[in-house]
């Protein structure tokens, strides 16, 4: 690609330093942020993090077992990092956020060097890495402590991609004789044990291998490409065999000894979404247009997003999403023989969306902003390639529109940076975060209950009671808000009302063990020893059964 930027000579070190600076500017204001929400279960209340005696359990139990809770996430490397942080600075929140920022910046640097090595275009690599570092949707993956799982797994994955590229680059020996190849192999399980979405790393490696190959004639001539398809498949399998073996072992473990309940279906019971791959595919099409909207117009950012499932193609948003998907795939295939960054970026985008698409595995949500942490790279790589190609055409025509083109790019980048900084303030403390989220998701039981808990912790009891009752109105059968409201009433010495809330909590869910203790104490204080004994025996029976 011949463009005006090629006439500008800047060093890779200058690009790297600039990326560090922009990454820091974008997220420096996360450092004063507090710790809340999932930080409590994953870090602050997690005994595995606080005591090295539990280190073996990190590798055999779910990630929040140390908090007495259950999930199907197995992330022992992430837990180990949290433990190192805890033992270094306990609950000092700024350093947790600093570690998140450091890993995010490191990922931007690795991305820059990977793309530069692949396409030999320093500015294409720089601008793509810059957007990765400063885009507002990244705030959800950087701005609170527990989000380290995203950047940590991507750090190992990008490190593996870079090492893999270095092994391919070394023409003095075969890749399988290069120590970098085996170090890249080591990065894969580390990434998997940081977050499950790293399962797609072999697909990225395969994409890199295809685009790195020197036998470009296979890709430029459709006939030769088809005739040599077996050779290409064999080459891919050979270079990826050990990575695929690790993926296979991981899946077997997660299906058996490390299956904590629903590895391949996080829904507790069968429903139209979890039981029908067609519904999940149609819903993915519906979500795709939302994702693109977030990438190019990231204004209304918030957690706890929800959409109705799509059961039919006969909906405008599903049709639009299908057209977008078909266009992306067709363009990626069309440009593939040219080994174009456009094709690479679009394939990257689709691969990176796969683990959170819900198509193969129904997971814990339909869409989250932090699920764009890696897919964003591919879409903006494709966009900047188009911009550079357009610039080349404008230069040939000696058009003044080239100034307007880059003015628009700079304006968009400045907008991304400013929106990221403002988004980080929305993560500053739990009250700010929950209230902002409720503006978009007023029916979220989890957010309303958590907001009530924060008010209770601050002894703003009237506000707490109001939000607990609001949570109960949203979903009356759930036990948690009744139990929390009971605790609030105990604090205010309103024992009769507390008793009523604890009783409702256990009626709704007899296995909600937290409510037994305080209700038994109330019965004892009232002289109701027989009722207390019955309740205690009920607790023993349920606890032994579980």
Image (cartoon, rainbow, N blue to C red):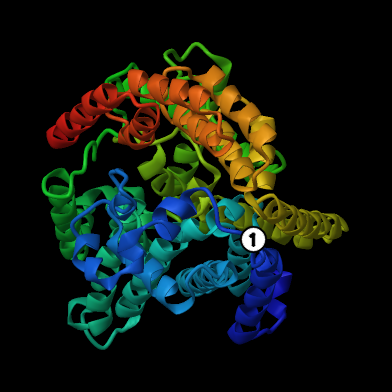
Front in this rendered view, residue 243 or 76: 76
Whether residue 194 is visible: no
Residue 174 shown left or right of residue 297 in the figure: left
Residue 186 image point, x, y percent: 24, 72
Answer left or right for 3 relative to 324.
right
Q: Mark 1 sits on what residue?
A: 33
- Residue at image coords 41%, 56%: 45
Residue 216 drawn at (x, y percent): 37, 64
Where residue 233 appears, x then y in whole percent? 20, 54
| 249 relative to 471 in the view: left or right | left
Drawn side of residue 273 relative to residue 27, left or right: left
Hey, which residue is sitting farthest right in the picture? 400
> Who is closer to the viewer here, 37 or 518?
518
Q: Nearer the viewer, residue 377 or 177?
A: 377
Task: Check the image and report above or below for 133 versus 439.
Answer: below
The image position of residue 177, as x and y in percent, is: 18, 82
Q: Quadrant of the C terminus?
A: top left
């Amino acid at each position: 690609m011949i463009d005006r930027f090629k006439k500008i000579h800047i060093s890779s070190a200058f690009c790297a330093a600039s990326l560090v600076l922009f990454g820091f500017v974008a997220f420096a204001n996360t450092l004063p942020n507090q710790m809340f929400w999932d930080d409590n279960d994953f870090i602050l209340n997690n005994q595995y993090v606080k005591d090295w005696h539990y280190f073996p359990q990190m590798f055999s139990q779910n990630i929040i077992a140390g908090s007495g809770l259950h999930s199907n996430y197995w992330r022992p490397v992430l837990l180990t990092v949290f433990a190192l942080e805890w033992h270094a600075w306990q609950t000092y929140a700024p350093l947790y956020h600093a570690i998140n920022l450091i890993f995010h910046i490191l990922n931007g640097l690795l991305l820059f060097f990977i793309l530069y090595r692949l396409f030999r275009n320093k500015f294409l690599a720089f601008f793509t890495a810059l957007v990765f570092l400063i885009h507002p949707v990244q705030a959800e993956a950087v701005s609170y402590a527990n989000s380290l799982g995203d950047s940590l797994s991507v750090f190992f994955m990008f490190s593996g991609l870079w090492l893999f590229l270095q092994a391919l680059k070394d023409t003095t020996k075969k890749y399988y004789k290069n120590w970098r190849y085996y170090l890249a192999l080591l990065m894969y399980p580390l990434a998997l044990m940081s977050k499950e979405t790293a399962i797609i790393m072999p697909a990225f490696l395969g994409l890199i291998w295809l685009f790195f190959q020197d036998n470009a004639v296979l890709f430029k001539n459709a006939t030769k490409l088809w005739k040599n398809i077996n050779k290409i498949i064999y080459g891919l399998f050979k270079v990826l065999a050990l990575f695929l073996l690790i993926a296979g072992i991981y899946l077997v473990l997660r299906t058996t000894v490390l299956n904590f309940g629903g590895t391949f279906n996080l829904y507790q019971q069968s429903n139209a979404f979890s039981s029908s791959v067609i519904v999940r595919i149609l819903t993915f099409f519906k979500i795709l247009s939302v994702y693109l909207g977030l990438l190019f117009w990231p204004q209304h950012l918030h957690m706890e997003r929800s959409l109705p499932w799509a059961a039919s193609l006969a909906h405008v948003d599903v049709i639009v999403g299908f057209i977008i998907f078909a266009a992306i795939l067709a363009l990626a295939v069309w440009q593939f023989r040219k080994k174009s960054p456009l094709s690479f970026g679009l394939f990257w985008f689709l691969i990176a969306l796969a683990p959170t698409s819900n198509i193969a595995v129904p997971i814990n949500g339909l869409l989250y902003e932090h699920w764009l942490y890696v897919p964003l790279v591919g879409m903006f790589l494709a966009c900047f390639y188009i911009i550079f190609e357009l610039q080349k055409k404008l230069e040939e025509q000696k058009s003044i529109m080239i100034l307007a083109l880059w003015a628009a790019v700079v304006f968009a980048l400045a907008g991304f940076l400013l929106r990221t900084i403002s988004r980080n303030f929305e993560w500053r403390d739990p009250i700010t975060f929950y209230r902002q989220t409720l503006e978009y998701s007023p029916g979220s039981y989890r957010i309303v209950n958590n907001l009530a808990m924060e008010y209770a912790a601050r002894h703003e009891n009237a506000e707490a009671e109001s939000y607990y009752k609001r949570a109960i109105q949203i979903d009356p059968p759930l036990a948690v808000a009744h139990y929390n409201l009971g605790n609030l009433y105990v604090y205010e010495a309103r024992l009769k009302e507390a008793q009523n809330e604890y009783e409702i909590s256990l009626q709704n869910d007899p296995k909600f063990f937290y409510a037994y203790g305080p209700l038994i104490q109330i019965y004892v204080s009232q002289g109701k020893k027989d009722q207390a004994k019955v309740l205690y025996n009920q607790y023993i029976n349920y606890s032994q059964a579980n």
